[in-house]
C-alpha cells in the first residue's frame, strides 16, 4: 500500500454504554476495548484510525463533514439512528466516501423495528451479529475496497 489509508470510526447513541448496556445482546467489551482493537488492527494493516462517539445526531453530522476532508472512508455503527436518520444517510451519501455499517447484534433477528436501516442501501457493506469482532471484519473489508483488492 503506497498511500496511507485513513479511516474514521463513528459510533452513535448509547454506544458509550458498551460493556454495561444489555451485555447479553451487545457483549461485555467496552467502547474503549472496541476502539483499541480497531486501532491495533489498523496499525497492523498500516491504516490510521480515528474514533468518535456521540449521542447527538448533530454532533455526528458535524464530525462526518469535518472528517470527510481527511479520511478515505468510515466505519459507522449508527446505533438507534439506523432506523430513524435520513440526515445521517444523506450526510454519508453527500461526502461521497465508502462506508461500512456495523452492528454488534444481528438486527435482522431482533425486534421488527430494528430490521429497517436507512444506511444499508447506500453502504459499501454491512456487518452485523459478530459482536465487537464485526468492527475488525468491517475494517478489513473497507480497507480492501479502498485499496482495490
Image (cartoon, helix red, strand yellow):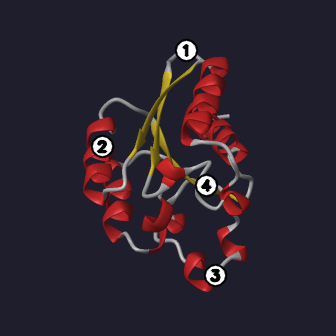
Count up the numbered dots: 4
Marked residue nearer the N-terminal end (3 or 4): 3
Q: Residue at x 38, y 54 (%)?
A: 92
Tag 4, which secondary structure?
Answer: strand
Q: Quote the CA–CA distance across marks 3 and 2.
A: 30 Å
- 6 lies left or right of 95: right
Marked residue nearer the N-terminal end (4 or 1): 1
Q: Quote the CA–CA distance across marks 2 and 4.
A: 21 Å
Task: List the residue tagged with mark 3.
Answer: 111
Residue neighbourhood size for the residue with mark 3, other residues' Cα within 10 Å, grouped as few (<14), some (14–19), many (≥20): few
Marked residue nearer the N-terminal end (3 or 2): 2
Closer to the eye: label 2 or 1: 2
Quadrant of the rendered image containing residue 93: bottom left
Q: Which mark is on residue 63?
A: 2
Percent position of residue 147, x then y: 58, 30
Task: List the residue tagged with mark 1.
Answer: 2
Closer to the eye: label 3 or 4: 3
Percent position of residue 49, x then y: 50, 28
Tag 3, which secondary structure?
Answer: loop
Marked residue nearer the N-terminal end (3 or 1): 1
Marked residue nearer the N-terminal end (2 or 1): 1
Percent position of residue 144, x then y: 64, 35
Closer to the eye: label 3 or 1: 3
In this view, 48 is above or below 85:
above
Task: List the residue tagged with mark 4.
Answer: 125
Tag 2, which secondary structure?
Answer: helix
Amino acid at each position: 500500500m503506497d498511500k496511507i489509508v485513513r479511516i474514521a470510526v463513528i459510533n452513535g447513541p448509547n454506544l458509550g454504554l458498551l460493556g454495561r448496556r444489555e451485555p447479553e445482546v451487545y457483549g461485555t467489551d467496552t467502547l474503549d476495548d472496541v476502539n483499541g482493537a480497531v486501532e491495533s488492527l489498523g496499525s497492523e494493516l498500516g491504516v490510521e484510525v480515528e474514533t468518535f462517539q456521540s449521542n447527538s445526531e448533530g454532533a455526528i453530522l458535524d464530525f462526518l463533514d469535518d472528517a470527510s476532508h481527511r479520511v478515505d472512508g468510515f466505519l459507522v455503527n449508527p446505533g438507534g439512528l439506523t432506523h430513524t436518520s435520513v440526515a445521517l444517510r444523506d450526510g454519508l451519501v453527500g461526502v461521497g466516501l465508502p462506508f461500512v455499517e456495523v452492528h454488534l447484534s444481528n438486527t435482522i433477528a431482533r425486534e421488527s423495528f430494528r430490521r429497517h436501516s436507512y444506511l444499508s442501501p447506500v453502504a459499501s457493506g454491512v456487518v452485523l451479529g459478530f459482536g465487537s469482532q464485526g468492527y475488525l471484519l468491517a475494517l478489513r473489508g473497507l480497507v480492501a475496497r479502498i485499496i482495490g483488492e
